[in-house]
Amino acid sequence: MDPLGDEFRPRESLRRALVLGIGVPLLIAFVVMTGVQFTADRELLVGKVRGEILADTQIACLRAEADLQAIEHSTELQAELLRAGGATFLPLESPMVRSRINILLSTVLTANPYAYGAAFAFAPGQPGVDADGFAPYVCRSPQGPALRESDLAKVPGYEFERQPWFLSATPSPNGTWSEPYYDAGGGGVFMTTYAARFRASGDLPSGVATADVSLDCILEGLARSADGKICDVSVVSRDGRFIASSIDGTRMKQAGDFPAGDIRREILDAARRFRTSGKEFAQVGPTSWFGYRGTRVVCVALPSAQWVFAGTFDEADLLPPIVKGLALGPGLLVAGAFVVMVIVWRTTGRAVRPLAGIISAIARFGQGDLDARAPVPARRDEIGTMARAFNAMGDELRGAITQREKAVAERTAVEAQVEAARVIQRVLLPAGDGPQGDGDVRTTEEFAGLSIAAMSVPATDIAGDFFDWFQRDDGTVVVVVADVCGKGMPAAMLMAVGRTLVRMAAAEIAEPGDALARVSKDLVTQAPQSSFTTAMLLYIDPSSGLVRYANAGHPPAVLVRADGVTTRELESTGSVLGLDLGIAWETKSIELHEGDDLVLVSDGVTEAGPKILEDAAQLDLVLFGEERTRETVASACRAAGRSPITIMEALVRAVRRWSHDYQRDDLTVVAIRRNARRPW
C-alpha cells in the first residue's frame, strides 16, 4: 500500500532533471583536479560519516544516560519511601515487612525495564538488624517474567557488607555506579550497580539502596543503537575495561588482554586519551595516502556513571565503487567514471539547491523549534514533495503535542482531586491511639472498656466503605460499619453523607433499629438518586457488656467467646438502607463478656476471590465466603497472644492469600474485644 497521498506524490523525477542537465564535459579540468579532489573527497566523506557516527553515539549515550538516571531516581525514591514509612517497616525481617520491602524493590524493576535487580542492604551490628545483616534483593528471572526474591545476607560466603558496591556507596541523592563485576550473590550475571546510602529514620536503621543493570542489557541497547548503522558502539568503564560492545570478545577485558595493534586495544587507548585530553576523535590502525585502511574512533562521555561511549567505523566500509574506480588510473577515469562524475557535479547544484532551506528547517526542528517549516519550491519533484511532507509532519506533531499537554493537565487535575478526597476520607475515620493510628488503619487499646482495631482498604483510589466509633452522652459506645454500593468518587461522596447521618441519628435515638430507619429515610429524601447502602450498627453498654444491634443487609458479624470455641453470627435484621421510606429494622441484643471478640466485616471480605472468569456456576467456588470468614476469625481468636490487631491482620492476610492479592471491592474489618475490668 502506497503511504503517500496524492498531494505528496512527485509529478516530476529528480533523476530526469539530472539527466537533462548534462552540459559541455569538463573532462580536462576534472582530470587536473582528480588527485586533489580524491584526497579532499576522502576527508569530506570521512568527516560527514564521522559527524553521523558522533550523532549516533551521542544518541546511544543519551538513551543510556536517561535509563541510568531513571534507575537512580527510582532507587532514591524507593529509599525515601522506606524512610518515610519508618515504623511501618519494622521489625525488618518480619514476613509482612519483607513483603512490603519487596514491593518497593519490585517497583524499581517495573518502572525501569533497563534495571536487572534492586536491593536494600542493612549492615549487621545496627539496632534491629540480624547478626548477618539484612539485604532483601529482587531481580529478574531468566526463566520468565516473574521476579526472584532473596536475602543477600543469607547467601553462603557472600558477605554483602564487604562487596565493593556496598563499600563505595555514597550518600543519597549522589549515589555512585560501581565498576562492572560478576555478581555471585543473588544476581548471578555480569552487572554494574548503582548504590546510594540513606540515613536512619527513627528506629529504622541506615542502609544502602541499590539497583543493578546487567551487561547483557547494556549490550542489547548497543545492538539496537548500532542496528542498520556502519559503526560499532562500545562502552568503557572508569578503569579502562569494556562494559559492553558490539565487537565480539571484549566483555570485562582491559587493554593488556589484547595484543599490540589489535583494534580492541586501540579503542581502549583512545578512550583513555579522551579522559585525559578530551579529544573526541581519533584515527587508529594503518593508513595510506590513497587507501581506506584505518579506523576512526568517536568518544562521548556518559556523565552519571563516568563511562565513555566509543563509536568506531572502518574507512574501508565507506569506500564507494566509483571512488575505487578513480584510483585505478586516468584511462578508466576518462572512459567512464569521470563522465559520470562531471554530469553529477554539473547538475547537483541546480537540482538540490532547494535542499538548503529544508535542511535549515530540519536543523531548527531538531533543536526544539516545532514551528520551523521548510520553504516549498515551485516544483513537483522529490525535493518539493519532501518540503511539503516535512511541513505536514510538523503541523501534525504540533497538534499532537498540544493535545497531549491538554490531556496531561486534565489527568493531573483529576488525580489531585482524587488525592484530596482520599485525605478527607482518612480524616473522617475515628482517631486511634495505637502505633498504627494513621493511614487506613485505626487502633485503640482502651475505649470505654473496649479494645478496637479497624482497617479499610479501598479497591480504587477512594473508598465507599467506612467505619466509625464514638460514645453517646449516656456512655454507650456506638460502632458502625457501612458499605455504599459501588466504588470511586460517587460512592465516596455518599459515604461522607452516610457517616454524618449515622452519627446524628445514633447520638439522638436510643435504639439501633430506629437509628437506621432515620438514616434510611434521610438518604431517600436527601439523596434520592443514590445507591443503596448496607450497614451494621452496634450500641455497646460498657458496664454490662450488653450489645444491641441492627443489621441493614450487611455481612453478619462474628462473635467468638473468650474460650475461643463458641461462635455466633449477628445476622441481618432488615433490608438495606436507602430503598424506601416505610422500611423498619429490628433491634436485637447479645451479651459481650470480658475477653469476648466481635469481628465486623464488609463484603470486600466475604466476596473476595481471585481474578478469574466469574460465571454464575463458579462464583460460590471462588469467593472467600461467610463460612471461611467465620473459621478464620475463630482460628485467629484461639491463637496465643491474640488481640484485636492480630485478629484483624490474620483475617486480612487470609483474604489476600485466597484472592492472590487481587481486590475487586473495598475491604473493611473491625475487631472489638471487651477488656477485663480493672480491680479498684
Image (cartoon, rainbow, N blue to C red):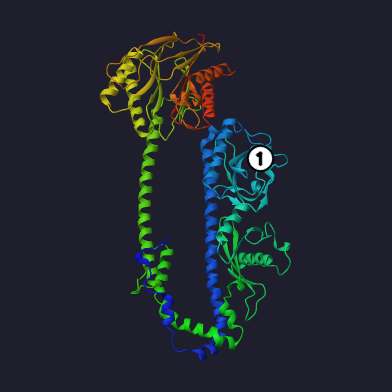
Q: Front-most of 624 and 491? A: 624
Report whether 74 appears left or right of 553: right
Question: Which residue carries the number 1 mark?
Answer: 152
Spot the residue most to the front: 1
Q: Front-most of 188 and 239? A: 188
Report whether 269 appears left or right of 519: right
Tell me what residue is drawn at x 44 percent, y 17 percent. 556
Residue 425: x, y in percent? Answer: 39, 31
Q: Is residue 519 visible?
A: yes
Quadrant in the rendering for residue 381: bottom left
Tell me what residue is drawn at x 71 percent, y 70 percent. 261
Q: Front-most of 427 and 152? A: 152
Q: Amino acid at mark 1?
A: Leu
Residue 606: x, y in percent? Answer: 47, 23
10 Å crowding of disc 1: few (<14), some (14-19), many (20+): many
Spot the residue most to the bottom: 28
Quadrant in the rendering for residue 126: top right
Residue 522: x, y in percent? Answer: 28, 22
Residue 503: x, y in percent? Answer: 34, 21
Tally the numbered discs: 1
